Amino acid sequence: MGCIQSIACNKSRIRRENIVVSDLSATIDHCPTVIEESSPIVLRYKTPYFKASARVVMPPIQRNETWVVGWIQACTQMEFYNTYGDIGMSSWELPQLREGLVRAISDSDGVSYPWYGNTTETVTIVGPTSKPSRFTVSMNDNFYPSVTWAVPVSESNTPLLTNIKRDQSFTTWLVALNATSREKILLHTIKWRMRVDIVVDPSLPLGSRARLVGRLHQDQPRVLSRMEPIPPNATGRPNANDAQVLMWRPRRGPSLVVIPPK
């Protein structure tokens, strides 16, 4: 009886080879980063979007199980420096990542752990189901930050910003998760990177100070031929937005924490 039950259980399990993924797409829009100089307080820039989507067919779920299929994303590297002439620079940093204590930090929306989001990013299937489930999951991501014209630890509003450099890397996984047992089935792994280099002449009038230098278009994402495992820190708290800290690093004198982690 034990053997018969075991065979029946194995047949009812969802396996990687039974999940069909088609029309997998991972792109970064072929357009340059846009600089906005409408505010006398901050410069803003908007990068092109990273976009990922896939059509998925899940086999029938024979048990009373709930499966979620969707996107998990983690930041694996970040350099984000704002230079103010020879005075110093501010930098957004992920201390645990910078010091090599972790390999990745979750890039979840801060609510839907481990998922990147919970609208178009995931689909939930509640078993048992009698026929295959067909659906599409998609996500997008970009940067749209504000950088102060003036030194962030100064009382002065004098514009002194001279350069913005950002280089950030991400790994994105398409995953099927058994919400009952927490079993994960990795379906695809994507690597992508976003780089920004902006030079600023703070002596010029607002609206004509900043320009993009270096690459105008981003490298396209890579869909890996082999699956890469998900590091533990990529699926739980804190996410990158809560873990990051804004530092002021002057040319002379000690560094200061401007905005601590949440």
Image: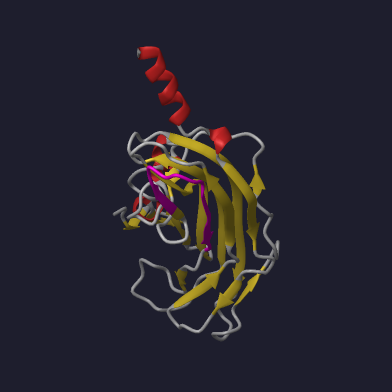
The image position of residue 44, as x and y in percent, is: 50, 73
Quick check: 128 left or right of 19? left
Please name the residue shown 57% across and 59% down the image: 165
The image position of residue 180, as x and y in percent, is: 32, 38
Residue found at the far left of this picture: 262
Q: Is residue 233 shown above or below 158?
A: above
The image position of residue 229, as x and y in percent, is: 51, 33
Q: Would residue 170 be seen by someone viewing this image from the given angle?
A: no
The image position of residue 41, as x and y in percent, is: 42, 79
Q: Main secondary structure of the magenta part?
A: strand
Displayed quadrant of residue 118: bottom left
Region in magenta: 123-142
Please name the residue shown 51% across and 70% down the image: 161
Please name the residue shown 44% across and 36% down the image: 184
Classify the position of the C terminus by image quarter.
bottom left
The answer to if 91 sits in the magenta stretch is no
Quick check: 28 left or right of 146? right
Front residue (pair 227, 129): 129
The answer to if 135 sits in the magenta stretch is yes
Classify the position of the N terminus by image quarter.
top left
Front residue (pair 105, 42): 105
Front residue (pair 43, 67): 67
